[in-house]
């Protein structure tokens, strides 16, 4: 079993829909990252969380430390949100990555 | 700041050749990480440095891989000799020392070994 599990693996949505991507982990962590990678592109850090909730534009990330679970929400999704979203947990100085969620948003 | 800078962006080489990938971290960042991304295995940590000192190289696949950080503004990842299974995208990332430090990735170096 992977230490970091993401669901779903693939997700399609119509423009404007509310999207949720989930991440569960089984190890103690000091922080959790949500990363975004566009096809053939680099990796961008969206959020780093150690507790609670963060919001940036249409993106919201939450974490529940007791339940070892985090969610990434996208409100009013847009085709430009199409990308792979990767959850990664930090243990000491190292990141352990989930396998990613491939999101496609259609107009 | 220009962000984390990697070169080359793309490299195509033949099996057996030496490959050197380069990374310039963000100025003032204490940590530098080298990751490899493949379709089969996703993102994997190869090695990381703290203040130019290698801390954990347990992810380096084998002796053909080596990494150096001669100063705070430059690191190299070398593969010698290269093999087709080394084909991947190699990312460099850096962050500051404090535990809340955001991680910043370079654009990646896409390596193809024929």
Image (spheres, helix red, strand yellow):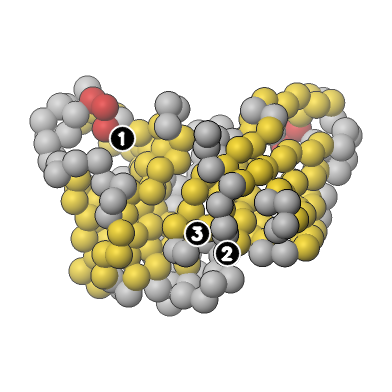
Tell me where residue B83 sits by quadrant. Answer: top left
Residue contact at pointers 2 and 1, CB within 8 angstroms: no
Disc 1 from disc 3: Cα separation? 28 Å
User: Which chain is mark 3 on?
Assistant: A
> How busy is the neighbourhood of tag 1: few (under 14 within 10 Å), some, or many (20 plus)?
many
Residue contact at pointers 3 and 2, CB within 8 angstroms: yes
Pointer 2 and pointer 1 on the same chain: no
User: Which chain is mark 2 on?
Assistant: A
Residue A1 visible at all? yes
| Residue B23 percent coordinates (x, y) | 33, 57
Disc 2 from disc 1: Cα separation? 32 Å
Q: Which residue is mark 1?
A: B111
Q: Which residue is mark 3?
A: A91
| Residue A3 percent coordinates (x, y) | 53, 43
Between tags 1 and 3, which lies in front?
Answer: 3
- The residue depicted at 40 percent of the width and 68 percent of the height is B31
Quadrant for the C terminus of chain A, please: top right
Q: Is residue A16 above or below residue B54?
A: above
| Residue B85 percent coordinates (x, y) | 26, 27
């Amino acid at each position: 079993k992977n230490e970091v599990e993401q669901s779903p693996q693939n997700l399609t949505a119509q423009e404007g829909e509310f999207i949720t991507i989930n991440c569960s982990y089984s190890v103690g962590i000091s922080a959790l990252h949500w990363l975004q990678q566009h096809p053939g592109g680099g990796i961008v850090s969206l959020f780093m969380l150690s507790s609670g909730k963060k919001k940036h534009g249409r993106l919201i990330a939450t974490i529940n430390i007791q339940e070892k679970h985090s969610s990434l929400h996208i409100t009013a999704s847009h085709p430009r949100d199409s990308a792979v979203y990767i959850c990664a947990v930090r243990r000491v100085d190292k990141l352990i990555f989930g396998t990613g969620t491939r999101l496609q948003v259609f107009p | 700041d220009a962000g984390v800078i990697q070169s080359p962006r793309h490299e195509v080489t033949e099996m057996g050749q030496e490959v050197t990938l380069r990374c310039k971290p963000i100025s003032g960042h204490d940590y530098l990480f080298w990751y490899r991304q493949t379709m089969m295995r996703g993102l994997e940590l190869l090695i990381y440095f703290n203040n130019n000192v290698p801390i954990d190289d347990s992810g380096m696949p084998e002796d053909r891989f080596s990494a150096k950080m001669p100063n705070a503004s430059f690191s190299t990842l070398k593969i010698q000799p290269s093999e087709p299974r080394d084909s991947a995208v190699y990312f460099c990332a850096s962050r500051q020392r404090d535990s809340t430090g955001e991680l910043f990735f370079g654009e990646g170096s896409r390596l193809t070994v024929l």
